[in-house]
Amino acid sequence: MSATALHKAARDNDVAAITRLLAEGAQVDARDGSGATALLVATHADRVEAAKALIEAGADVNAKDGIEDSPYLYAGARGHLEILKMTLAHGADLKSINRYGGTALIPASERGHVETVRTLIEAGVDVDHVNRLGWTALLEAIILGDGGERHRKIVALLVEAGADVDLPDGKGTTPLQHARARGQAEIERILVAAGAH
């Protein structure tokens, strides 16, 4: 009876096997070769039922693997909304950071996961957290986003949540300067309306 059986059951979304393995004494937070728990494996594959069974059995939503991903951080970054909400309801550490020194909100903003961003803001994640690149969620949404509807909505959500619209990147370039340089006129309008310089 190894961690691998539990990890496989998680990947396969096999709740019956998860329940049986845990009843037989499998450790809910046992790690695989990459340092991932079964819950992180379920989160990678967006296996909602498996994640629910593991979380209800006490799996640690903040347990990090070898590259600093946790179920909470990964669900946020990838927009796996149902699993994210479960991690938030079971003690997700809103201050935890990924290997880039960023919160879950930063990659969620970059990747255009509107509902995930809304959920993380409502949960209380720091909207002005700066990662190791010198970027906030607002800067990532502009610099790495495509300027399309999803990123416009995210910029609006961040601004509404009180994000500092003038907080520059590590080189001193502001969100407004980045938006202008990329021809993101709609995002530029949102920032100017919020008093950005």
Image (spheres, rainbow, N blue to C red):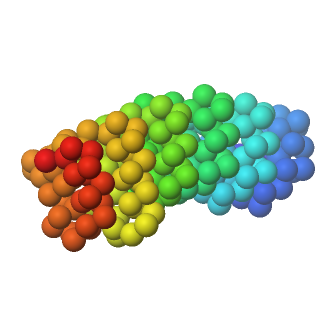
78 sits to left or right of 170: right
178 to 105, vertically: above or below: below
| Residue drawn where x is 42% and y is 54% of the image | 154
The part of the image, by quadrant, that contains residue 22 is top right
| Residue drawn where x is 77% and y is 50% of the image | 50
46 to 106, vertically: above or below: below
Residue 1 percent across, percent down from the top left: 80, 45
Residue 146 percent across, percent down from the top left: 35, 70
Between 86 and 188, the residue placed more toward the observer is 188
Between 19 and 35, the residue placed more toward the observer is 19
Residue 78 percent across, percent down from the top left: 52, 57
Between 108 and 93, the residue placed more toward the observer is 108
**Residue 41 can be seen, yes or no:** no
Residue 187 percent across, percent down from the top left: 30, 60
| Residue drawn where x is 42% and y is 47% of the image | 157
113 sits to left or right of 40: left
Between 42 and 94, the residue placed more toward the observer is 94
